[in-house]
Image (spheres, helix red, strand yellow):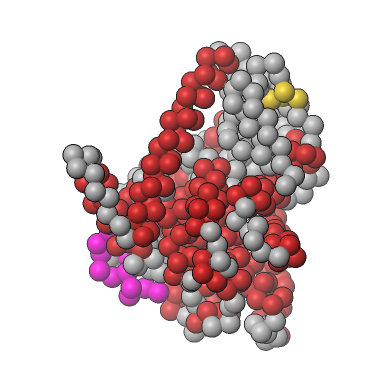
Amino acid sequence: MSCLMVEGCGAVTFKRLEQNAIQVRMLADGRLSTGHAGVLLAERRGSYPLIDLHILNTSAQQGEVESCTRRKVKRLLSFQRYCHASRLLRGLVPHTPGSLHLLDDDYLGQAGHMLSKVSAWNFDIFLFDRLTNGNSLVTLMCHLFNVYGLIHHFQLDMVKLHRFLGMVQEDYHSQNPYHNAVHAADVTQAMYCYLKEPKLAGQLSPLDVFLGLMAAAAHDVDHPGVNQPFLIKTRHHLASLYQNTSVLESHHWRSTVGMLRESGLLSHLPADMSQDIEQQLGSLILATDISRQNEFLLTFREHLDNQDLDLQLASHRHFILQIALKCADVCNPCRVWELSRQWSERVCEEFYRQGDLEKKFDLEISPLCNQQADTVPAIQTGFISYIVEPLFEEWQRFTEPSLLSQTMMGHLHKNKARWSRLRFTHPTSESQMQPHVEEDPEPEGGGGGGGGGGGGHEEDVP
Ligand SMILES: [Zn+2]
């Protein structure tokens, strides 16, 4: 296994394959050096240096000690969460007299109830994440692997599976408003809904399902919360490593490969099979690069026009998995308003934070990142018109007849109209964000945000 571990006094640990290919200078106090002055790289387990930009002249020594302690506590808590999650997954109830587990059990009971309706399009991933104590990605993935019998089919070791999924979840940055483990869980839940589409479900092999879910769960892992142009203009080492092309997506993929190898999840499989899985995961994750949107859209449209998609062919199924993952990645505007709105706020907040960093370091502010000029409704209407709508129109053609696609298009059109109205009626971004009473009644009674906890309408929507 070609991974490298370095333990500095700041407990800096590097475990990714990419690390072998790059030059990283370790400073005496355990910090990393990059080309961009004035930037202190955050330390995260197994993570690449991040754009969690702190100014260099902060008290690094003290910060590292605190960071180290925090990490240990976090690991301990993570371990406790795993115990809870595994109990939930095995349907066991912990018995510890006098403990405080009663509340946890109640929460986990509700999370378990939500999982029974995980195929509902109005599944509230935010609520699910709270009920699982921030463990939504691991819990969801284990559940779906059980649903599909993937653990048995691929003879997976449960300990290794938990280790892998735990690493993936932990390597998402919880401080990112948008690109965090909840987004990954949301994309995974959407992917599950797409894999269940009647047009697709009967054609997929266990390997297809395994790849689809794994790619969804890991597709943004270790995302730094800034985009590729930012990495390029700050001369981040990942940009030069991947030659300014699909920089983030390449990093998500290679990080996933590193964690697969580190966990040994696939070590019992023949080498050519695990290599094939790694390559296919790469092809799926790289397809989420939004700059390749037109390339995929045109090919998809051409296949649909020619009616030449043959899902008996592994290559065609792989292409559809790429499209499904792309759809799942940008499906926020197709969710019910209350969920959709929260994602919109989060993604714009992440853009604005990048804009603030650019301002702070005298860099040109990237498009969509200027909070004063780029309002949330304007960003959302553009995103829906140019990215989401064209893609989902083709997805609807492919899945036809599909109740889910109809539902998604219904939400998409209503949400787009709502953002358009907000764009012209509320000039300031603050007022745009208020979830005040709107003119529309909540679409599809019961669909609005209550989510899996109790609402009885989930299964009405595929
Ligand atoms: Zn994503």
Viewer-closest of 183 and 45: 45
Q: Does 142 appear above or below 52?
A: below
For the question of whether residue 292 can be seen, the reply is yes
Quadrant, the C terminus: bottom left
Q: Position of residue 90 (x, y in %)?
A: 36, 60
Q: Does 54 appear above or below 170?
A: above
Q: Does 123 appear above or below 228?
A: below
Q: Position of residue 73 (x, y in %)?
A: 43, 30
Tell me the magenta residue range.
447-462
For the question of whether residue 424 can be seen, the reply is no
At x 64%, y 47%, the residue is 262
At x 49%, y 57%, the residue is 158
Magenta span: helix, strand or loop, mainly?
loop
| Res. 226 image quadrant | top right
Left or right: where does residue 252 sit relative to residue 105?
right
Q: Position of residue 365 (x, y in %)?
A: 64, 35
Left or right: where does residue 197 sit relative to residue 119?
right
Left or right: where does residue 186 sit relative to residue 271?
left
